[in-house]
Structure formats: structure tokens, C-alpha cells
Amino acid sequence: MTHRPLAALALLSAVAAAAPAAELVTLSGKRTVGKLVGVDAKAVEFHDDAAGVAIKVPLQEVAVVDLKNPSSPGGTGFDEIELTDGTVLRVAKWQVKGKAVAVEFLPGPAGAAAPAVELPLGTLFSVMRRADDPAARAEWKKLLDKRGKRDMFVIRGAEGLNPLPGTVIDGTDDGARLNFEREDGTRAPLPLTRASGGLVFNQPPKDVLPPTVCRVVDGFGNVWFATSVEAAGDGLKVTTVSGAVALFASLGGVAKLGFGRGRVAYLSDLAETADYPKYDKETEAAWTLAKDAALWGKELVLAGTKYAKGVSVPLDTTLTYKLDGGFREFKAVVGISDVVGDGEAAAKLTIELDGRVVFAETVSKKAKPKDVTLNVKDVKELKISTEVDGVRV
């Protein structure tokens, strides 16, 4: 009898324990304690506990939203799923069922449920078995570096990884087999267990992407590149750039939202090969690329907004940048510089990725500057061309 009140008190104490307050940290170092409400393409909405009000902080001012939850999962061995947007998921088990992938995540924080997910096959880049083994990871990287233009059903043999090229159609309803079409057109239901190395997908290119607003790090060992984060009851709904969805029933399963840009390279800091227009040396001055400035040495201003970084490109010019597959996303704001006085000025802007035209539009002084986000994952060469369209400036 004497133990029952103590047991009851301990239970009540556990139930009443409050979740740790979240903290929003800006790039200037300001810290606000409270609760995450949501994220959109422009701002983080956060409840400021001290002030008792919800505030909106522009994305460009936010460094991180730390939810004060652990990010290291339990368990040791895991497979790794990479999505086309760079999202990385560490899973204990996975199956292909129909046109989607079903997963079992690693153990997460105590009391936190793993997210419910929607992973269409069209969002997948690869699934690597034995991803916790450094030797297996190194071998997998070599395989990816040599991949062709087909999906691959990868079998691990005594002498290493043996890729079977073809096309992944879908999975059986029970997830045990994969319907696979070989290069010769024959189809066969292959046991998923035979993909002992993993799977590689050659997805149709999605050149124009929604922008990445943040990286969501959860408590199950996953990193999601999110294009939106929405409040969903006491949890969050995360939609990735590639279109996968993760629904967290509680914030206890989310560790932090990072808004740092990670590895960023500006065009003005990269080496380029420039093909400039021909000109009459007696009557015309030579135009060259201007870095972090407008042409003629003026400030770089578009529609009244000043930019510290950027390039100003003369008309009839082609710039070529060697990316060598080292970047994930290309983002730009394009427009006619404010130093151009002609209100009718316009130019045709073309962007190519490995020889494929992915953007070709007229940019005019009359129109607002345009945001452009492109998928440059695995792209070797970026080419930007301008040409006269209307009045020459």
C-alpha cells in the first residue's frame, strides 16, 4: 500500500512534464523563446512567449529554429534513401509497394512517433543498402559516378556491386517483388531482397523547382529539404522540394529547422568562360561582364532593391560555368538593371544545363524581376546567354 501513492505521483509527474520551449535564432544573434507556428516561402511564424504574441521573421533573417529535441536516432545498421532534392532518410526497413515506398524509420526520441510519409517513386534518386558501413558507402559512390541513363537494380556479389540496368515499373502489393523491365524489353518480377546493393533511379529531369525554404532535421536521423513547413495540430507537415510529404504528429519528433545556406557559391565568385559580342573597335566600346556591380561600374540595383552579389551580363554574351556535379540548386533573381534608363529595354535570357535549355524567357524593364530556381544536381556545365530582344541597351 505504501508504494501506490509514490507510483501515482511519479506517473502524474511524467504526464505533467512540459516539452522544452523552442528557440528562434536570427543571423544577428537575437534569440526568441516560444513555439514554432509555421513556415512559408517568406517568413517563419513563431510565438514569442515573453511578449505573448506571434511574430513573423523574414526567412533571410533566420539562422535556425531549435526545437530542443535530440536528433540522433537509436539503432545501428541502416539503409539510406536519397530523394532527388537531396533529402536523406535513414531507415531500418523499406519496401516498394505500387508506385510508392513504404519505410520503417530508426527509433527516435522517447515518446515521439515516427513521421507518416508519402514517398512516391518519382521522388527517389537512390536506395543504398548497408549505408552504415563506410566501405559500402565508398563502393556505392563509385557506382553512382559511373551510372548510365537507366534505372539500376543493384546486386551485391562476391566481387562487389553488380548493377542490372533497366526500368523500375512498380512494386507488388505486398512489397516483396519489384516489377522490372530489362534493357531488352523483357519484364520480370524480381525479389526485392535480391537488390542487396540497392536501387538507383534515373528520373525524368525536373528543371524548374519550387525554392527550398529550410532543412528539417528530425529525431530519426533524417534531413528533409523542405519547400513548405505547416503547423498540423501539435505537429508539423513537411513537404519536400521533390514532392515527398512527412507528417509529424508532435514536435517531439523534430530537432531543428536550419535556414543556413550551407555551401553556397555565387556566380560572381566562380570562374567563367565568356563569349562576348563582336564590336566595331573604332565606334564602339568593348562590354565585359560586371561582377557584384551593374555595367558601367554602378551599384547593382533591380527595381529599387540593392544586391551585394550578382553579375551584370552584356547583351549577345554567353557565360559558361563548370559545376562538375557539385551543386544541388541554382537560384537567381533576373531583371534589367535600374541603371538602364530606357523603359522599353528588354533582353532574351537563356539558361542551359549540360546542353539542355531549361529557361528561355524575355526579361524587360517593364516587368518585375523574376525569381528562378533550377535543379542542378549532378549538372556538369551551366550556360547563360543573353541576346537582343527589342530595344538594344
Image (spheres, helix red, strand yellow):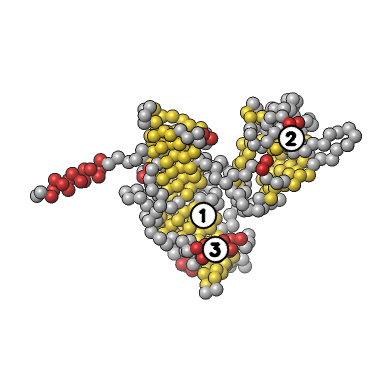
Q: Quadrant of residue 144?
A: bottom right
Q: Amino acid at mark 1?
A: Glu
The spot of residue 203 in percent (x, y) is 58, 54
Q: CA distance from mark 3 to mark 1?
A: 15 Å
Instruction: Identify the residue at horizontal 61%, vertical 60% (top origin).
Output: 145
On the question of residue 50 being in view, the answer is yes
Instruction: Check disc 1: other Cα within 10 Å, few if <14, some if 14-19, many if 20+.
Output: some
The disc labelled 3 sits on which kind of residue? Ala
**Circle 3 residues within 10 Å: few <14, some 14–19, many ≥20:** few
Residue 365 on image: x %, y %: 70, 29
Up/down of 219 relative to 127, above or below = above
In the picture of the structure, the residue carrying the numbered disc 3 is: 138
Residue under circle 1?
Answer: 82
Picture quadrant of residue 248: top left
Q: Earlier in the sequence, mark 2 or mark 1?
A: 1
Name the residue type under label 2.
Ala
